[in-house]
Image: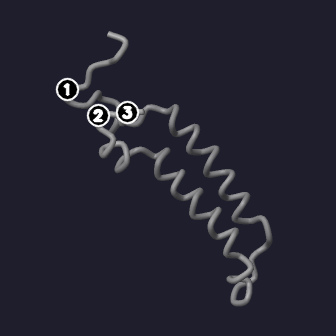
Amino acid sequence: MDLLPEWRRLLKHAWSIRLNILAGFFAGMEIALPIIDQWVSIPRGLFAALSGLTTMASTIARLVAQRSLSAPPKGYQNADQ
């Protein structure tokens, strides 16, 4: 497995990455819900639903061209060429 040449740029700018991180946060909050429930009343399954929605959004974001990432990085050569 090889990293993409501009993986740092993707990590900073790709919405799919940002949304996956947010989905991970929501999944963690669902696990922490029994502890949080002492202070705040949150419906069970809310964070799981939010995690699922952000995961679907990240899949869509992965397929949509993003202006900041549309241009091929400097020195990038397509493996198909």
Which image quarter is the N terminus in? top left
Residue 47 position, x and y percent, is 69, 65
| Type of the residue with mark 1 | Gly
Residue 57 position, x and y percent, is 60, 45
| Type of the residue with mark 3 | Asp
Residue 27 position, x and y percent, is 65, 62
Q: Is residue 2 left or right of residue 52?
A: left
* Residue tagged 2: 5
Q: Residue furthest front?
A: 1
Mark pair 2, 1: CA separation: 9 Å
Q: Is residue 24 left or right of residue 31?
A: left
Q: Residue furthest right?
A: 44
Mark pair 3, 1: CA separation: 16 Å
User: CB under 8 Å between callouts 2 and 1?
Assistant: yes
Residue 75 position, x and y percent, is 19, 26
User: CB under 8 Å between callouts 3 and 2?
Assistant: no
The residue shown at (78%, 65%) is 45
Q: Which mark is residue 75?
A: 1
| Type of the residue with mark 2 | Pro
Specify which label sits upstream in the sequence, 2 or 1. Answer: 2
Look at the numbered disc 1 and give the secondary structure of its residue. Answer: loop
Look at the numbered disc 3 and give the secondary structure of its residue. Answer: loop
Q: Residue furthest left?
A: 75
The residue shown at (27%, 20%) is 77
* Residue tagged 3: 2
The relative height of residue 56 versus residue 46 in the rendered view (above or below) is: above
Q: Is residue 76 left or right of residue 67?
A: left
Coloration of the structure image = one colour
Q: Residue furthest bottom?
A: 39
Look at the numbered disc 2 and give the secondary structure of its residue. Answer: loop
Q: Residues within 10 Å of mark 3 (few under 14, many from 20)?
A: few
